[in-house]
Every structure is written in C-alpha cells, then in structure tokens.
Image (cartoon, helix red, strand yellow):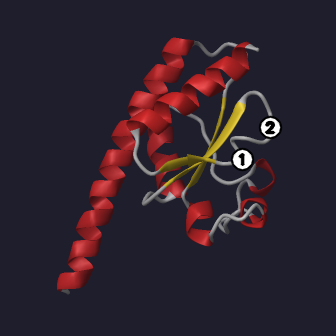
Amino acid sequence: KQRTSLRDLFEKLVTEKIQGVSITAQSAKRVSNTSSLVIKDVDGDTMLMSLDIKGFSVSTGAACSSGSPEPSPILLAMGLTREEAQSSLRVSVGWKNTEAEIIAFVDCLVEVVQKLRAVNVTQKNREYVG
C-alpha cells in the first residue's frame, strides 16, 4: 500500500508540475510500484541519462524492452505513437523510498525536462534558419 501511495503521489506531482505529461494505462490495473509516463517533446534516452547523472535510476520503455534502442513494442501495441514511446519514462518506487525522495525526484525531473525542452526549441529554431 505504501508503494502505491508513493506512485500515486509521484503521478499527481508530475502531472501538476510538468505540462504535456500523460500516464500510460493510468486507469488500468497495474503494478503497484511502477509508473510509465510520456513526457511530450523530450527524448526518453536523453532524459534517462540526465537523471542518471543526477543519481536517479529510471528506465525508458517497458521492462521487457529494456536496453533496446527501438521504441518498446509493448507501448506501441498499447496505442502509443513511435514518438510517444520514445518520450516514455518508467519509474519504480522501492520498499525504502520516502515521500521526501519522491518530491526531490519530481523537482529534479521538472528541471531536467525544462532544460531538454529548451535545447529542443533552440535546435528547431536553428533548423528553420539553416
């Protein structure tokens, strides 16, 4: 029950603080400690590396496609577009995680998403000019 509460807190905070976030299969029965989300206009692998540098272990895609450079076939079969699947992030809550850690992670995620989106806008502007 604690892990479900922390997962739900994470999803609540992330959807409140970051625009363009959707929780994958939110209304379905799912694992109590895991959240899969799509963050629009952010590359999942770049986000994963940015969070890893900051000390957070997350994954992209579905667990069964871990390590593959291709979008998760599971997420594609669930109806996500290729772009959405490549913007996915999978976050799991452990037995020892606390509410404070969830809040700290969301704050870090907000910062990472803002930076990556700013880079994306800059790159798109360069493409139009060039």
Q: Position of residue 49 (x, y in %)?
A: 49, 48
Q: Residue furthest left?
A: 129
Residue 48 sits above or below residue 12 on the image: below
Q: Residue furthest bottom?
A: 130
User: Which amino acid type is marked by label 1?
Assistant: Ala
Residue 3 sits above or below residue 36 on the image: above
Q: Residues within 10 Å of mark 2 (few under 14, many from 20)?
A: few
- Which residue corresponds to the image point at 69% horizontal and 41% vertical from the top-left? 26
Residue 10 is left or right of residue 47, and the answer is right
- Which residue corresponds to the image point at 63% horizontal and 16% vertical from the top-left? 97
- Which residue corresponds to the image point at 77% horizontal and 66% vertical from the top-left? 73
For the residue labelled by badge 1, is the local secondary structure a helix, a strand or a loop?
A: loop
Q: Are marks 1 and 2 in contact (CB under 8 Å)?
A: yes
Residue assigned mark 1: 25
- Which residue corresponds to the image point at 28% horizontal and 70% vertical from the top-left? 123
- Dividing the picture into quadrants, the one containing residue 11 is top right
State the mark number for residue 110: none
Tell me the quadrant of the picture where the N terminus can be found: top right
The span from disc 1 to disc 2 (Cα, nearest Å) is 8 Å
Residue assigned mark 2: 30
Q: Report the number of discs.
A: 2
Q: Position of residue 3 (x, y in %)?
A: 71, 19
Q: Position of residue 64 (x, y in %)?
A: 81, 53
- Dividing the picture into quadrants, the one containing residue 42 is bottom left
Q: Which callout, 1 or 2, points at the residue further toward the start of the chain?
A: 1
Q: Residue furthest front?
A: 27
Residue 118 is left or right of residue 38, and the answer is left
Residue 81 sits above or below residue 28 on the image: below
Tell me the quadrant of the picture where the C terminus can be found: bottom left
For the residue labelled by badge 2, is the local secondary structure a helix, a strand or a loop?
A: loop
Residue 25 sits above or below residue 54 on the image: below
